[in-house]
Image (cartoon, coloured by chain):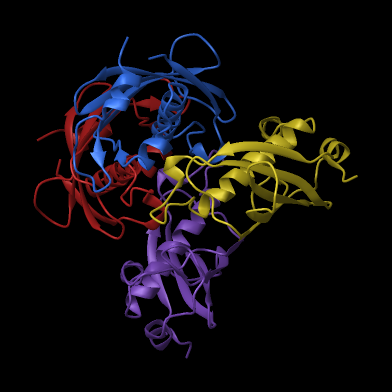
Chain colours: A purple, B blue, C red, D yellow
Amino acid sequence: MKKVRIDVRVRYVETDKMGVAHHTHYFSWMEQARTELMRQNGLSYRELEEKGYMLPVREAHCRYRHALSYDDEVTVEAELLEIGGASLKIGYRLYRGKSGAPSAEGYTVHPFTDKGGKIVKAPRFFTVLFQKE
Amino acid sequence: MKKVRIDVRVRYVETDKMGVAHHTHYFSWMEQARTELMRQNGLSYRELEEKGYMLPVREAHCRYRHALSYDDEVTVEAELLEIGGASLKIGYRLYRGKSGAPSAEGYTVHPFTDKGGKIVKAPRFFTVLFQKE
Amino acid sequence: MKKVRIDVRVRYVETDKMGVAHHTHYFSWMEQARTELMRQNGLSYRELEEKGYMLPVREAHCRYRHALSYDDEVTVEAELLEIGGASLKIGYRLYRGKSGAPSAEGYTVHPFTDKGGKIVKAPRFFTVLFQKE
Amino acid sequence: MKKVRIDVRVRYVETDKMGVAHHTHYFSWMEQARTELMRQNGLSYRELEEKGYMLPVREAHCRYRHALSYDDEVTVEAELLEIGGASLKIGYRLYRGKSGAPSAEGYTVHPFTDKGGKIVKAPRFFTVLFQKE
């Protein structure tokens, strides 16, 4: 499963009175990168939900190293870290611009559930596509 | 139908790099006041949805007069302006503290729809409760 | 001054329990389009603030016609509607996909202020660049 | 330093198409509880910033156990976990209603910085007030 990188730009609404991006929005950017990670590996999250599965967030973590400012271009990298029988773990790195040291790093953990929120086994069509190389 | 007032406090996440509350959040506060307007007049929005009706937003307007700062206590007043056969209009005033000139004023317009989003007539149990005095 | 179009995609965090994009986020998309309108006409909003000017929102309006769903690609068009001595008005149209009838339309009005929030005359370098054709 | 509990209600804007509160908003609720933790222990965050100090977020973590629904009343508990010479760690528990098992748990870590974002030692007036019992 290949890594994916997306580009976002810090929006005014995402800044706070410190003049930098508020920490909560990093989790939205991670989600956006996670969506593209799935799409570019062959199955969009929208399709997954249409097939009756959901991937709610069980755990979310972010380590902030350097603040991001309004209008900064940010690259968000997402990659599969682990895939088990019933959950997966995705890792993220955020960079100001295209390179250099990461401005932030994080991960999220997701169980597979059915539409009612009940935890289920990862569907085979998913594990085949998204197995870790 | 009686007016309702709620108190909110400007949260850090709601400020922007101008150091004041970002304009988008006023619409969330109006929604919060609208929720209490319904609850305190006898039918919560949650119950309305459980009965199979929704009130999506067809129109939203806000006029900003004075900026609101981090940690400011804000009173949001909501009142029914119009109720027709298929939609209603709600007006809002936002005050810093409890009195004085409004910091902002706005309104929203809402059609009644069924769960599929199709426009329907206002249900009678609603118009009876929420008729304008 | 030329019109500008940007593409956004409805993010999961922007949906609500009706299953569609929550109305507040349209105002963030408009802001994003406004930012690109300025940048592509020769002066980014970031630069304007660095020169000591701000364009807070005095008025915001949106008319919602058709709901937008998760993962929909949305085109947001922004254009200058009016420019006066001390304020400007910008209009927006949102389309699902690239064409068809707009899903929503709106406008915002912005006074020019200095860094302290005091209303000032539009700076000449701005009106020269952004005069309405 | 005493624990603090605040009550919030899940707002419509905070739900997503799964029908539950989106995971990003838990971090805003934690921030809201952190603000009250400081205020009720004698120094509001607003005052701390006025004195020239900031507490940006260096690390944020949340473990989600049970989903929270629209209009649910949520109690958010915040308490000081650690205070060192240059940073502090705060822990959170979120409950649906007033009791029972937590719906989520988290923590945040904050360095002390000056207004320019440079890391500084915890000011003495702070450590005196906020020492862990």
Q: Is residue D23 left or right of residue D110?
A: left
Q: How many marks?
A: 0
Q: Quadrant of the N terminus of chain C?
A: top left
Horizontal and vertical percent for residue D91? 73, 51
Horizontal and vertical percent for residue A98? 43, 69
Q: Residue at x 46, y 24 (%)?
A: B67
Q: Quadrant of residue D59?
A: bottom right
Q: Is residue C1 left or right of residue A81?
A: left
- In the picture shown, does residue C123 fall above or below A33? above
Q: Residue at x 40, y 82 (%)?
A: A126
Front-most of D38 and D26? D26
Q: Given the current orientation, which residue lies at the most extreme bottom position?
A: A133
Front-most of D4 and C87? D4
Q: Quadrant of residue B63?
A: top left
Q: Residue at x 48, y 87 (%)?
A: A132
Q: Given the current orientation, which residue lies at the most extreme right position?
A: D133
Q: Kindly tell me whether residue A92 is visible in this rendering.
A: yes
Q: Given the current orientation, which residue lies at the most extreme front position?
A: B125
Horizontal and vertical percent for residue B53? 30, 39
Q: Quadrant of residue B30?
A: top left
Horizontal and vertical percent for residue A30? 47, 63
